[in-house]
């Protein structure tokens, strides 16, 4: 599920959402995404929300992980628990936007881990990210969540790259 296509004003918003100074924008987009999710998943409400994790170095440099803020806003709006530390990156990966689509899946293969402190057996998980282009990151994160016991993993993003060139621009 996506609010829209990664171009024009939505593209500008997603780029801004990656900076701490634009937290209010990210939270607002999270509220919009919550309404979109509510409409799309009316019959199959998620049990928990999980953001796509960023490597700890990226978190320090940026000062924020946009998907964490998105799940915070969605969770408040839908009254669904958000678990920000369930998914983590085992290793630093290359920036997906700099890679060819064929390289992106290899870049994130086995990069995610799931915190064993949570029991998510048979849970419906909504995985949240800011943008999806090839789906490599979401696919690998969802696979990790399913291995940890999730019954279903749906994905919600602010923007979906459609018709973008091979480098995502």
Image (spheres, helix red, strand yellow):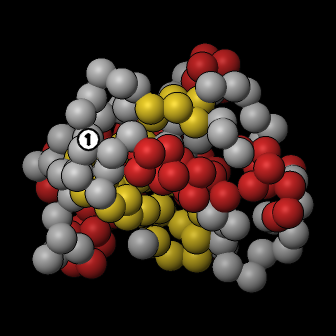
Q: Nearer the viewer, residue 36 or 116?
A: 116
Residue 79 appears left or right of 49: left
Q: Is residue 5 visible?
A: yes
Q: Nearer the viewer, residue 94 or 75?
A: 94
Q: Is residue 74 visible?
A: no
Quadrant in which the C terminus is drawn: bottom right
Q: Nearer the viewer, residue 41 or 152?
A: 152
Q: Is residue 63 above or below residue 155?
A: above
Q: Which residue occupies 63% across, 64% down?
A: 135
Which structural element holds mark 1?
A: loop
Residue 58 sits in quarter: top right
Where is residue 26 shown, x and y percent of the image?
43, 47
Q: Which residue occupies 15% across, 75% down?
A: 42
Q: In the rendered image, which residue does mark 1 sit on?
A: 120
Where is residue 106 shown, x and y percent of the image?
80, 50
Q: Which residue occupies 59% across, 41% down?
A: 18
Q: Nearer the viewer, residue 14 or 118?
A: 118
Quadrant in which the N terminus is drawn: bottom left
Where is residue 125 shown, x and y percent of the image?
30, 53
Q: Which residue occupies 62% across, 25% down?
A: 90
Where is residue 101 shown, x and y percent of the image?
82, 64
Residue 139 appears left or right of 44: right
Q: Is residue 102 above or below residue 54?
A: below
């Amino acid at each position: 599920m996506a609010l829209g296509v990664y171009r024009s004003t939505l593209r500008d918003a997603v780029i801004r959402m990656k900076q701490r100074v634009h937290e209010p924008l990210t939270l607002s987009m999270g509220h919009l995404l919550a309404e979109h999710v509510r409409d799309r998943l009316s019959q199959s409400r998620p049990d928990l929300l999980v953001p796509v994790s960023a490597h700890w170095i990226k978190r320090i440099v940026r000062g924020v992980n946009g998907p964490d803020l998105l799940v915070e806003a969605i969770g408040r709006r839908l009254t669904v628990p958000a678990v920000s530390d369930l998914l983590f990156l085992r290793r630093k990966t290359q920036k997906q936007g700099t890679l060819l689509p064929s390289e992106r899946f290899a870049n994130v293969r086995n990069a995610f881990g799931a915190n064993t402190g949570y029991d998510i057996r048979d849970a419906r998980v909504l995985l949240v990210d800011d943008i999806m282009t090839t789906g490599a990151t979401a696919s690998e994160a969802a696979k990790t969540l399913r291995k940890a016991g999730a019954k279903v993993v749906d994905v919600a993003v602010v923007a979906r790259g459609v018709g973008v060139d091979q480098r995502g621009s």
